């Protein structure tokens, strides 16, 4: 093989590999969410207010998320822990599961809803480039559409003296996903929505985020950012005799990097 042909082959390989690298993107972030609960739950019995009866209050929980952008398909991974434990006392008897709990006697309760997300999504081709050109580089708009599978592990229980009742189940929830981002360079504004409604059940999850880039390298390399925002979940479900009309809401802060 002549030197000219070898040089041409190397050039083609570099061009191809460079295109593949540029087509790959990764964003990872972790932070804390202030989870403020509201609503009611029941298990084969009385409806209990998570605020007034179970006395659950705001909890600060860590979370993590990863976005992977590939040439043909993009992936979204996330983990959100939800965990409430508190002591309560009611002035009336109440039923949870197959047990009836006594009035005016303290009890301990817990509610856990660990959430694992796996999503696939696609952006609208060339939209960001077109909007950047139309605004003379001031802002680039990107729209994402996709599907999300949320695995939710639910555990709930109440214990009072020699009485104890608990339940647990795992449910896989298919969700529709839509995302919007407006990139101003050093600052970006983002919104995400996931949701579905069926058989008198619904699962809605909305996120608003403002990102500030605190470190970046030209052309290639990692960028670091700080994100602040607000998240709201509205859940209504009936699974294995466990019913919930439940909301979680509150601000969050995160620190992340992207490539």
Image: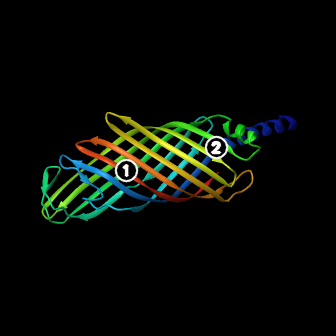
Which is more foreground, mark 1 or mark 2?
1
Q: Is mark 2 on a helix, strand or loop?
A: loop
Return the x and y of residue 1 as percentages of the image width and height: 83, 34
Task: Please say if 195 is above or below 155.
Answer: above
Which quarter of the figure has residue 235? top left
Q: Along the horizontal axis of the image, is 140 left or right of 252?
A: right
Residue visible at 45% across and 57% down in the picture? 250
Return the x and y of residue 112 as percentages of the image width and height: 32, 54
Q: What element carries label 1?
A: strand
Q: Label 2: which residue?
A: 24
Question: How many marks can you see?
Answer: 2
What scheme was used to colour the molecule?
Answer: rainbow
Neighbour class for label 1 at 10 Å: few (<14), some, many (≥20)?
some
Mark number displayed over residue 247: 1
Foreground: 168 or 248? 248
Q: Which of marks 1 and 2 is nearer the N terminus?
A: 2
Q: Along the horizontal axis of the image, is 52 left or right of 36?
A: left
Return the x and y of residue 123 as percentages of the image width and height: 60, 37
Residue visible at 33% across and 38% down in the picture? 201
Foreground: 183 or 123? 183
- CB contact under 8 Å: marks 1 and 2: no
Return the x and y of residue 107 as percentages of the image width and height: 20, 63
Residue visible at 54% across and 36% down in the picture? 145
Which quarter of the figure has residue 102? bottom left
Task: Please say if 202 is above or below 223.
Answer: above
């Amino acid at each position: 093989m002549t030197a000219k042909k070898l040089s041409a082959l190397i050039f083609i390989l570099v061009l191809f590999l460079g295109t593949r690298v540029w087509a790959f993107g990764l964003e990872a972030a972790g932070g804390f969410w202030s989870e403020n609960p509201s609503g009611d739950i029941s298990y084969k019995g009385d409806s209990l207010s998570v605020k007034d009866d179970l006395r659950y209050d705001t909890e600060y929980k860590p979370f993590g998320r990863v976005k992977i952008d590939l040439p043909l398909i993009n992936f979204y991974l996330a983990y959100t822990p939800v965990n409430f434990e508190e002591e309560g006392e009611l002035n009336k008897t109440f039923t949870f599961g197959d047990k009836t709990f006594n009035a005016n006697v303290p009890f301990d309760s817990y509610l856990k809803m660990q959430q694992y997300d796996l999503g696939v999504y696609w952006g609208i081709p060339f939209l960001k480039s077109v909007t950047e050109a139309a605004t003379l580089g001031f802002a680039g708009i990107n729209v994402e559409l996709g599907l999300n599978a949320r695995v939710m592990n639910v555990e709930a229980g109440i214990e009072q003296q020699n009485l104890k009742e608990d339940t647990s189940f795992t449910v896989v929830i298919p969700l529709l996903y839509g995302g919007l981002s407006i990139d101003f360079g050093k600052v970006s504004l983002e919104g995400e929505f996931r949701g579905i409604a069926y058989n008198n059940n619904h699962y809605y999850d909305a996120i608003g985020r403002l990102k500030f880039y605190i470190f970046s390298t030209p052309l290639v390399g990692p960028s670091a950012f700080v994100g602040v925002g607000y998240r709201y979940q509205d859940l209504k479900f009936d699974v294995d005799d466990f019913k919930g009309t439940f909301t979680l809401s509150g601000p969050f802060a995160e620190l992340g990097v992207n490539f």
